[in-house]
Image (tube, helix red, strand yellow):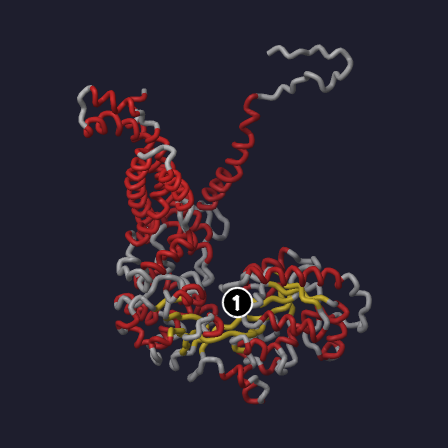
Amino acid sequence: MAVAATGTGARPARAGRRLSVPNWIGTVPFFGYVAIFLLWPTGIVVYDAFKNPAGNFTLSGLTALGNSQVRGYFIGSFKLSLISAVIGAVFGAILAYAIAAGNPDGMIRRLYLSVSGVLAQFGGVTLAFAFLVLIGPVGLLFHAGWYFNFPWGITLIYAYFQIPLMVLVFLPAIDGLKVQWREASESLGSSTWQYWRYVGAPLLMPAFLGALLLLFANALSAYATIQAWEDQVPYTVPQQIYNSMSSEVGLANINYADVLALGMVVLVAIVMTGYALLQRRAARWLR
Amino acid sequence: MRSPYKFALAGFAAAALLVAGCSSSSSGSSSGAAAVNWATESSAAGGGGMTALIAAAKAEGTLNVIALPPTWANYGTIISTFEKKYGIKINSALPDGSSQQEVDAIKSENGSPKAPDVVDVGLAVAAANTSLFAPYEVSTWSAIPAAQKESTGLWYEDYGGYMAVGYSSKFGTITSLNQLLSPQFKNDVALNGNPTSANAALNGVMMASLANGGSVSNIGPGVDFFAKLKKAGNFSPIQATGASIKAGTTPVVFDWDYLNLASYVGVSNWKVFIPQNAVLGGFYAQAINKNAPHPAAARLWEEFLYSQAADGGQNLWLEGGARPVEQPTMTSNGTINTAAASKLPAVTGTPVFLSPAQSTTAATYLATNWAKAVS
């Protein structure tokens, strides 16, 4: 690029001079942020997982992952995240389709979108308390005997924010389906089933799987809601991490918490790999 | 400490801090009894008596306290009474802090004029941090039972309570824990937290153990009791709080009596009972920072807290629903506020207290057996 370097004495220092900055400089804030708030803490967790409370290096902490109690926390976390993500994704996708089919500038659509935006962020103690007061064992609406059953009681509560979140992230994908594609397939004689089987579903599948993964991670990392739902039995890994960090009665062990957190990192890595493989297959037609 | 601290009262602390900041600059040089170094005195008599201590404390002009919620055990009134009586400003830092944060502040602010002068901590924390404290024996030292103080005065228990069952009066009157196993208590019985992590909950299970043939070194029968509660469908797995009691979702709660009184939880139809064969006590402890920036004021504060006078700390704690450590002596010498004492739930039987070792034994047992019993 030819910059007019014609400054002849008047303002040589300021006019027209370009700093020669490398292209990557714009990415510094992003990578700096990721380094401080993601990589660094993850590094600390991994590093401390290989230490004992006295500060010496050891591999024995990892044996906790083979303990049947600990395996139970991971199975609980996985089960809860998967069930609540699937329920959220299916119902959210149907709801999103219903919204997309309506008037794009209509009142209903705007109402649903803004309500979803609010409800997707509603969680934690307030949400658990609301459910407890309404349908808990001594609830105002009715007394749900299964309210404290894992995972169904807590899945119902999670669905409350998973479904709206799905609507928000999946609606743009459905909006991307062109009416002309449907018309084209119908004019070629396809049935509704055939349209969805050969056109609609393949188009939406990558977005659907991506949203499902988001919902899974959302449930996996949730802590405040389930802790407010019940406080006595740790069903999920985040609950047990809390217990092992905050115990007032002498059971606190930060390195054990680090081992559990490391296990969650591994769990997410496995799920991400599975997701990548599925996504590859689902997006085959794009290549 | 686990307690519903009020954020609104942070303003009070901030105001106290401002006032304290203004007044402390004018102090220091006007010390009357210059010869006495109060930082090394282990009693008021040793430094020349109460008059000398009051004069020296007034000269310092300020006292730094930490983690004293004004709504907890009447601390709001205790602080204002001390300020009014001696003209010493109290800088109340971090009212919603925990015991561990109190000792952390002593370490991290060592040498600073804002370091805490005195702390009010749980027993485990007190016992583990004696190297940070200065020994001091208040004038009423002999009224503190020997089992409730460190023998040289590094820490001394101040107030506490007994593990109690609070319940909605719709159930009539409860006189034994086994009543809680009947069908009318379906989903109703809750602890204040998870006993593998919260001290109040661990003591709740221990109380059930004592009532069912266990002992301070055997929490097993308590776990069995909660397993029976769970089997009967009466155990509630949510954490009991003031909010859950008000909302009616935890109509029966195991907790310290001073957190379980109708006046504290703010529910009028709320009753409390302490099983007569299972009186389990839990106390907090006072200690003075050995490098306190206001050594005389710190010692005067302890004298005030352990004063048996009508407006002294012991009776003020009692008015807040907590049991002061000198209550047995005060009951016999007639200095107790009988009106306040009569509002506490009745206790029959000999109170027992968990030692740190017994508490650890119980926690270790719970770590492997609690979740199995109630899931």
Residue A30 image position (x, y, % from top left): 52, 32
Q: Position of residue A280 (x, y in %)?
A: 31, 27
The residue under the point 30% across, 30% down is A204
Q: Residue B174 lies in what quarter of the image?
A: bottom left
Residue B20 x, y percent position in the rendering: 71, 63
The answer to whether one can see residue A267 in this image is no
**Residue visible at 59% across and 70% down in the picture:** B75
Q: Where is B93 relative to B259, above or below?
A: above
Q: Which residue is mark 1?
A: B122
Q: Are there few (<14), some (14-19), or many (20+) residues within 10 Å of tag 1?
A: many
Choose between A193 and B139: the one closer to the eye: A193
The answer to which quarter of the image holds residue B51 is: bottom right
Image quadrant where one finds the C terminus of chain B: bottom left
Can see residue B3? yes
Which percent across, then down, holds residue B166? 40, 73
Position of residue B119 relative to residue A154, above or below, is below
In the image, taking residue B284 as reference, residue A183 lies left or right, namely left
Helix, strand or loop at disc 1? strand
The residue positioned 72% from the left and 77% from the top of the image is: B46
Question: The residue marked by circle 1 belongs to what chain?
Answer: B
Given residues A11 and A220, the one toward you in this image is: A11
In the image, taking residue B211 as reference, residue B304 lies left or right, namely right
Amino acid residing under circle 1: Gly
